[in-house]
Amino acid sequence: MSISTKNFWFRFIAALPILILFIISLNGSSIINIKFFSVNIHYILVYYWILRQPQSLGLGLIFLSGIISDVVLGFPLGVNALSLLMVAGVASYVRVVTVRITLVNDWISFIPALLFANFIYFISLYYSSYSIDYVYLLKNSVFTFIFYPVLWGGFSVISNLMRS
Amino acid sequence: MDTSREDVGIAIRSAFLRKGTQQRYSLFGLALLSVLLIFLETIETKPLNGIRSVIKDLVYRAAIVASYPTKVISTSYGVVERHFNLYSDYNNLIKENNELKNKISTSDFLELENTQLRKLINEQVASSSNLVSARVMLDKQSPYLNSFVINVGANKDIKNGMAVLDGKNFIGRIVDVNYFSSRILLITDLNSKIPVISEPSGSHAILSGHGTNPPTLQYLPKNHKIKEGDKIYTSGKEGIFAPGIIIGKTEFAKEEIEVSLFSDLNQITFVNVNLGEKSKD
């Protein structure tokens, strides 16, 4: 492989988390619905990269992606941005207090991140006079938690590629 | 005990207030900015509305480009699925065609009778509605909000609250107007409440959306005489929509009366926005 191709490949892999972040928000597909499954991949993406490699995903970009999601999905500006920043906040806190990061640690500490983010989501929409399906919100949180290891595996592959 | 509290404090400060490696903004600062934006959404002033409108128009255009590959994939999937269902669809259409042929003669007679009766009471039959056609730009239906974005806005005199039709069927109302685009809140959304009337039973009710489930009739009178298959129309009671726009027909569920919509909301490409009555000058 020539140097320029290698360089391009390296840059592409390094930009992959940002690319996925913006594709998700511009596509309005932060929540994937398959039959009764409902998974918020936006939360998992932000949580994983802030916890593992915060230098790959800027907080400003997360904020911008949240604003785009709000516009595409028709929510008041700032709701998704605040929820995503809350997920990033919990991930930053876990990174500071944890010495050894494993999948189980990540997975368990994802619970408070989900709870805080959904609480913010609920409060912001409640005060903006939007009706929310609470059962759906709960179902989405449960499936997002269950689905975390699957995306964790996928993101770990990208992370390893970056290091190599 | 004090030391562990201090540790937590330091960790929180480090996570939320400090800028991390290669991070330009602090988390706390961005969170404050988000709260400010949410607060600003509640304020309606001309300059703020203008800025919001520009941001939304720009994001919608970018979203169309970004969602093009997924749109192509889902369209191709739809084409393949339709090919597989060709034979069963053909049989269904033959059956439907025969039923419709039988109904035409009854319908012709009823139409004639209706015109004669209207003449008797001197009613103006001519329609005075003023429609603007639009293309659906984005149909990203979030589980929390069922809505479409269309390619007309304030540039075509679209205003909040206007009725949106698919052909002649009511499908929702305008809830957000930008200069080149507007958002339609679909009738299935949790936030949608439409005053309706049933025919021929004539009972007034509110049609409430439930997200993924079909909308239901609420606040019906106790002694209502609604039957399965009754047609549901807008009642025009709130004074925003014209009365008599068809929505769907009733279907009895366990404890509720559901309304099966005449339009398939997943298959809509073009819509008509009802601008209201034409001025007579």
Image (tube, coloured by chain):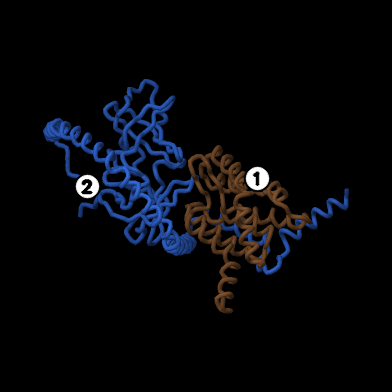
Residue with the mark numbered 1: A115
Please give the letter of the chain rendered in blue. B
Residue B100: name its quadrant.
top left
Q: Is residue B225 above or below residue B71?
A: above
- Which label number is shown at residue B128? 2
Hey, what amino acid is under mark 1?
Leu
- Assess disc 2: are there few (<14), some (14-19) or many (≥20) residues with their C-alpha within 10 Å of its C-alpha: few
Q: Chain of mark 1?
A: A
Residue B72: name its quadrant.
bottom left
Residues A89 and A152: in front is A152
- Assess disc 1: are there few (<14), some (14-19) or many (≥20) residues with their C-alpha within 10 Å of its C-alpha: some
2 or 1: mark nearer the eye: 1
Residue located at (68% from left, 56% from top): A89
Q: Position of residue B15 (x, y in %)?
A: 73, 59
Q: Position of residue B21 (x, y in %)?
A: 71, 68
Question: Relative to residue B16, is residue A158 drawn left or right?
Answer: left
Label 2: element kind: loop
- Report the quarter where the C terminus of chain B lies: bottom left
Residues A123 and B138: in front is B138
Please give the letter of the chain rendered in brown. A
